[in-house]
Image (spheres, rainbow, N blue to C red):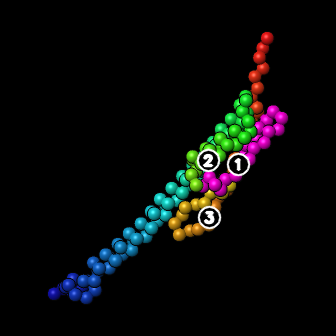
Amino acid sequence: MRRGAPSGRGRWAAAPARRLGQATVETAVAFTILVLILVSTVQIGLVMHARQVVFGAVQDGARVAAADGGTLGEGVERTRALLRAGLGQEAAAVTVTGRADGDTVIVEASGILRLNIPWVTDVELPLRARVVTQKESFHGGD
């Protein structure tokens, strides 16, 4: 028998088992990294969605309040309704305020968004939006 040739015993026989163990560890590490990337991507998408919902709700609320015949209360309520529709239970953490100064209407929303990252708690991001717009008025010509 040739020296160093695999005989089914000793260190040559253990090599396939070591490769299998190494492949298992590599798969576990790669899978963990893949899951982290996937969770991060989904979370970034949720944050961007929440920010767009808040801005869109404030923008539409200001439009309703500034419309000819519209009131500030209607604009604020419209903003709250859109936040509830777009954010669900997370809308409870967003405060909506509005005020009218002369010819302008200002509607603001601010709050927090809790991140949904597994095994990580108490991570919050601020949500803020402010829209200032002119009140509509119709001036009929003679």
Considering every residue shown, the one lying at the far right of the view is 102
Spatial CA distance of label 1 from label 2 is 10 Å
Judging by the rendered image, the residue that carries numbered circle 1 is 96
In the picture, the quarter occupied by the C terminus is: top right
Residue 110 falls inside the magenta stretch: no
How many residues crowd mark 1 within 10 Å: few (<14), some (14–19), many (20+)? Answer: many
Give the extent of the magenta segment. Answer: 90-108
Q: Nearer the viewer, residue 69 or 42?
A: 69
Dot placed on the residue nearer the N-terminal end, 1 or 2: 2
Q: Nearer the viewer, residue 45 or 2?
A: 45
Q: Are marks 1 and 2 in contact (CB under 8 Å)?
A: yes
How many residues crowd mark 2 within 10 Å: few (<14), some (14–19), many (20+)? Answer: many
* Residue 42, image x, y percentages: 51, 56
Dot placed on the residue nearer the N-terminal end, 2 or 3: 2
Judging by the rendered image, the residue that carries numbered circle 3 is 123
Q: Is residue 51 above or below residue 133?
A: below
Q: Please tell me the numbered disc located at residue 83.
A: 2
The amino acid beneath tag 3 is Val
Spatial CA distance of label 2 from label 3 is 21 Å
Name the main secondary structure of what is drawn in magenta. Answer: strand
The amino acid beneath tag 2 is Leu
* Residue 22, image x, y percentages: 36, 75
Q: Residue at x 78, y 20 (%)?
A: 139
The amino acid beneath tag 1 is Val
In the picture, the quarter occupied by the N terminus is: bottom left
Dot placed on the residue nearer the N-terminal end, 3 or 1: 1
Helix, strand, or loop for circle 3? loop
Q: Are marks 3 and 1 in contact (CB under 8 Å)?
A: no
Q: Please tell me the numbered disc located at residue 51.
A: none
Quarter assignment of residue 56: top right
